[in-house]
Amino acid sequence: MIIGAIAGFVAWVGDVAIGGGESQVQAALDGGHTFSLIAIVFLVRFVLGPLCYAPGLPGGLFAPLLVIGSFAGLLIGKTMEAWVPGLTPPLPAIAATGMGALFVAVVRAPVTGIALVVEMTGVTSLFVPLLTACASATAVPALLGSRPIYDTLQERDAGHRESAERWLAGRRRTQLAHVFSCRGSLAQSCDVPPSQAPRS
């Protein structure tokens, strides 16, 4: 309930930072946002994504990753544009590269990430920077010992299932113990009608 209330408040304050992510990715690839709006959307999505996954409920992961990656690329591109404008590549290209790099770093699927970005943008000239960024995005998490997100989520779901099964098993044992204790005690102590009480 608390997480739902937070998401609802964010939607009420500014709906540009919520949703499935398709419109945000398209806006990032267009490169028309200001630096402050890019930073706000990035921070909100960066915090809201893990927060929505915290209760263990099913939810989307694919599109939110693309949003965070594209806006992270835009932040880097806008910073480069302010400091070294002559060396800054086009902002949509940086956004697309950031999108692919973050997807590969989290999911650990470099071929899928490169193919995805090339298909979404339709620009084959991004292949070389994408290949470089995705190679780094694969190597760095591996060196840091970070596991792919889907493996982590699978282990978490398995742990939740085991906890639920243990709780149900304990509840069944408690109920069975109550039934057997009632059979050997007086009927009145187990809330059994006198007509159904066993005769001594």
Image (spheres, grey):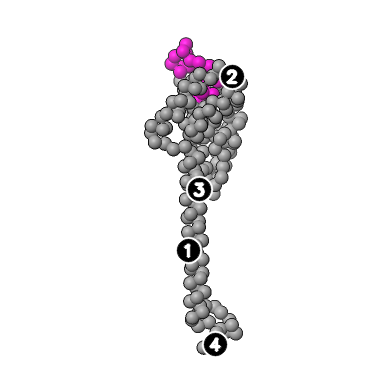
Q: Amino acid at mark 1?
A: Gly
Residue at 54 percent across and 19 percent down: it is 126
Is the Cβ of the residue at disc 1 closer than 8 Å to that at disc 2?
no
Secondary structure under the numbered disc 2 in the rendered image = loop
Residue 157, disc = 3
Q: Amino acid at mark 4?
A: Arg
Query: What residue lies at 51% left-to-right and 69% top-to-bottom?
Result: 175
Chain-order first, disc 3 or disc 2: 2
User: Residue 107: within the magenta?
Assistant: no
Q: Secondary structure at mark 4?
A: loop
Residue 175 showing in the rendered view: yes
Q: Amino acid at mark 3?
A: Asp
Q: Position of residue 86 (x, y in %)?
A: 47, 11
Residue 68 visible here: no
What's drawn in magenta, residue-wise?
80-98
Q: Residue at x 55, y 16 (%)?
A: 125
- Residue 188 placement (x, y as % from top left): 52, 82
Given residues 194 and 81, the one toward you in this image is: 194
**Spatial separation of the CA atoms under disc 1 and disc 2:** 58 Å
Q: Secondary structure at mark 1?
A: helix
Looking at the picture, how far across and down is residue 178, in whole percent?
Answer: 49, 73
Which residue corresponds to mark 4? 199
As measured in the structure, the alpha-carbon distance from the residue carrying label 3 to the one carrying label 4 is: 50 Å
Name the residue tied to disc 2.
Answer: 123
**Mark 3 near mark 4, Cβ–Cβ under 8 Å?**
no
Q: Of label 3 and label 1, which has the lower sequence position?
A: 3
Question: Magenta part mainly helix, strand or loop?
Answer: helix
- Say which amino acid is labelled 2: Val
- Identify the residue position indicated by label 1 in the image: 170
The dot on residue 55 is none
Residue 188 lies, with reference to residue 30, above or below; the image says below
The x, y position of residue 117, in whole percent, is: 56, 25
